Every structure is written in C-alpha cells, then in structure tokens.
Amino acid sequence: MTRIMLSGCNGKMGRVIDRLVAERDDVKIVCGVDINDVQNSDYPVFTSPKKCTCECDVIIDFSHPNSLEGILNYATENQVAAVICTTGLTQAQKESMTEASKVTPIFFSANMSLGVNLLIDLAKRAAKLLEGSFDIEIVEKHHNQKIDAPSGTALAIADAIGDVLEQKPVYTYDRHSVRKKRGKDEIGIHAVRGGTIVGEHEIIFAGADEVIELKHHAASKEIFAVGAVKAAIFLKDKAPGMYSMTDLVAEI
C-alpha cells in the first residue's frame, strides 16, 4: 500500500486524483494539503505540509509553484518521496528539486501523460531525421484559466528536440515585432488560451512541399491524474535521485 499526501487536494486535479485513488486498493490518500482546508473526503486537510501529522510514503503535488519550497522541505526532512506535477516552475525551483533529490527521491515531468511522453519520443526521432531540411514549430492550446505560457510541456518538447539536434535551437515566442525571415535554427513556440481546452500539443515539421505533424489531444485531466498515481506507486522505496516519466515508462 502506497500512502499519499495530496498537495492541492481541493483543486481540480486534486479532486480527480481523489476519485481515482478511491477506486484502487494499492494506494491510499492519508492526508491533504491546500490553502482551502475544507475537508471534502475522509482524510484530514492541512494548510501546509509541516502541519501534517500523518505518516506517508509519497507526496503528489498539483498545487502552485509557491508551494514547492514547503513541499521539498517536508520531503527532505522526513525522507518522503515527492511527485511534482505543478507547472510554471522557475529554473531556480528546478535546481532546488535537484538538490532535494540528493536526499530523497523526486519525480518531475512537465506532463504526466504517457501519451505526451510518447509524443516527445517521436518528436526527437523525427527532428534527428529531418534536421537541416525542415522548420519546427510547436503549438500548444489550453483552457483560459491556465496561468503560465507557453506550457511546461511545450518547453519540454522543445528541449527534448534541442537535445538531439547538432545545432542548438533558438526559441522564438513572438514574431510580430521583428520583420525578418525565419531563421533555420529557430523553434517557434506558440500558446493559445481559450474555453475549456484541457490540453493540445502539436509539433509541425515544415519542409519543401511537405509537412509532417505530430499531435496529442487530451480529452480530460484524468490522464494526468492516472500518470501521477502511477508515478507515486513507482517512486515508493526508490533510492534518492531525480526520476521522470522516461524512467516510469522504461519500468512498465
């Protein structure tokens, strides 16, 4: 049995995870953390990890970047693993996760969907094969309540592509203020916000007289919750270190 502390338990993703876990017998939420400490399930809710009195094996965090420091402090002080699902983290915050991983296992992926991580793998293969003759553009779409732009997933896709290219790409987010032709080393990254779009990511490889498109469409937030729960079970009893969806997929 994997015992979970759910950070952001009263948020949209927290409620989805709550429902999924209730349908399983190999994992249990023993406590929640949320600035809104209303108890909506059968576990206690605290306003910060340090106030928690329950023993847990793994923290699943779907809260806000501002909560990361408290989560990592609790994880390292109590030798508890942490699955960080929050997006919009700064470089300094990512470095703090790496530091914490020296003490306790930390799992971080910009997107917890198995399908998205397959998309990233396919994009890397395509970019390597098409390098030099195809322009690369990434378009991501999300609901109108999403704060960060571009999405962490779009940046993760761009970074993964950049890792396999011989020439390091330049990310271009906005072309309206610069009147010049597109550079061959650019990766254009575009964000769309509207309605209740859960999440769409499209990678366009545009060459001479042909276009190749790779696309992932998320119909609900449940796919991210499923990935987070799988990550928590995967992370239990792991040695300290940084883990990602790549490690989880390799073990399946």
Image (cartoon, rainbow, N blue to C red):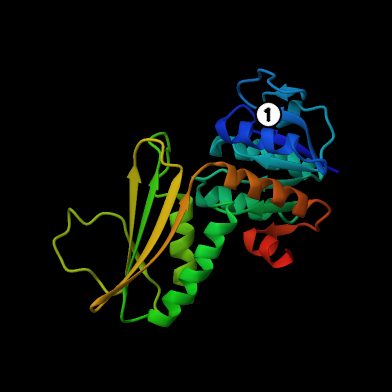
Taking depth in this image into account, of 169 and 39 the one nearest to the observer is 39
Viewer-proximal residue among 150 and 21: 21
Quarter the C terminus occupies = bottom right
Above-or-below relation of 14 to 209: above
The residue beneath circle 1 is 33
30 vs 69, nearest the viewer: 30
Secondary structure type for disc 1: strand
Direction from residue 152 to residue 55 in the image, left or right: right
Q: Amino acid at mark 1?
A: Val
Determine whether, in the image, residue 121 is placed left or right of residue 5.
left
Q: Quadrant of residue 46?
A: top right
> Percent from the top left, x then y, of residue 188?
31, 61
Residue drawn at x 82%, y 38% is 56
Q: Residue 20 sits in which quadrant? A: top right
Q: Position of residue 101 (x, y in %)?
A: 71, 54
> Quadrant location of the N terminus?
top right
